[in-house]
Amino acid sequence: MLASSGRFVQLAWRKSACKSAAAASTRSVVRPDLNFDYLLDEANVSCIRKNIASRKGIGDIDALRAVWKSIETFDPAQHSDKETAEKRYNELWDKLYEEALLIPNFSHKDAPEGDESAACVVRTIGARQREGKLFTAEALVKGWRSLFHPTTTSGKRSYAFLGSLSNLESQLLKFAYTKAVENGFKPVAVSDLVEKKVTAACGLVQRAEHTNIQYVLNDHPETCLSGTAEMGISALLRDRVIREEDLPLKMVAYSRCFRPEVSKSATEARLYRVHEFTKVEMFTVCAPEESENELQHLLDVQTDIFENLGLHCRVLDMPTQELGAPASRKFDIEAWMPGRKVFGEVSSTSNCTDFQSRRLNLTIKRRDESRCHAHTCNGTAIASTRAIVALLETLQTDKKGFTLPECLGISQRSRPIKLQQSSAFSYSFDC
């Protein structure tokens, strides 16, 4: 429910009363409706600590409680003047929310505990098509004149599809999108530019000791390129109230995804891990009591897509250290890539319970007029580059050809575009 504890409300009122007349005339900042009733209850501290420890230790409940103690015992008389006292008091509240936002979601009771090695295979899809000495996707298409890496203009992890590969990508995206629509997901188109407040609300937190995890616009430092349509859809849903009778609200969107990632091994080189790719994303808003069912529905749509493509996959119940900040439970789908001889992640789906909705101010209006926070789930229908790698390596023929899955329709052959290399051209803007 949306109600807060009496103690927290009283101090929130005290903060408001501490504002100067000038500040009171401006519009108040709306903060996320975090569950402070639970976080500040002494009886829950041990449980919260254990949950944080199981999820890579992100978040500090003791730091949060220390700030809260400072707020409870704050004495304006200890400061030289009212303005200084007000400034310090506001800083404490800012710090309280800063610490609270770092506390991760609670892991589902059935989520395996541990690191990546603790992932549990819950089912497999399809059979392995071929084994032996097979080409990687990039080696297979080398003679097709369909794959280029324009690194001089777009960086080391860039690529361009021409002809056959461009057609294959279009067919894959259309197939997955159509499957999602057939399963009740409503088409939406959202921006690939989002506020950093939205990405943070989705659970993407930049830590100082880590490399950048999102691309930020130089002239607009509070705006970044989206890493998934989940963020654009979240921006659309921010500050919304949805009627219970309209649930579940299921949406699907195409998007370009931008991610400043680095490879961990040679198998992740070239097309496997790139800085931008196209994806079809599914997103569900539902009542709290339905989120586990909706997570399973997303997983069913995903497995149906990869089964139709003829890929051999395994579905993994991901352990607590792999859930990130927002997910309570997460399933990954890994496809066998026989050219690379590895299982590679091609899709995932997560139940974020009320983690995102609290930060987005996304609520449900029940039939009895009461309000509660929505639950959100999301899942990848298809990510173009990884799916193409798995398909090419699985369905390659003996003569460096490729058999198109029946579900994608008729092969769209096109004459290759011939590009010849010329001498390098340098730009000069000096006058």
Image (cartoon, rainbow, N blue to C red):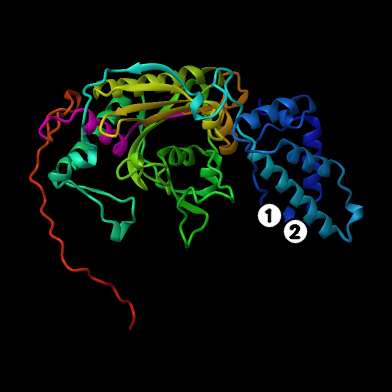
Identify the image quadrant of the N terminus: top right
Residue type at mark 2 is Ala
Q: Which residue sits furthest front?
A: 133
Q: Which residue sits furthest right?
A: 77
| SS for callout 1 | loop
Residue 284 visible: no
Q: CA distance from mark 1 to mark 2?
A: 7 Å
Say how many tags the image has.
Answer: 2
From the image, tell me which residue sits under label 1. 26
Pick the front one: 98 or 149: 149
Residue 239 visible: yes
Image x and y of residue 371, in percent:
61, 26
Q: What span is colored magenta in the figure?
A: 378-399
Residue 97 is drawn in which quadrant?
A: top right
From the image, tell me which residue sits under label 2. 22
Residue type at mark 1 is Thr
Image x and y of residue 103, in percent:
64, 36
Residue at point 59%, 38% (across, down):
359
Pick the front one: 9 or 35: 35
For disc 1, the neighbor class at 10 Å (few under 14, some 14 to 19, many from 20) is few
The answer to whether residue 388 is magenta is yes
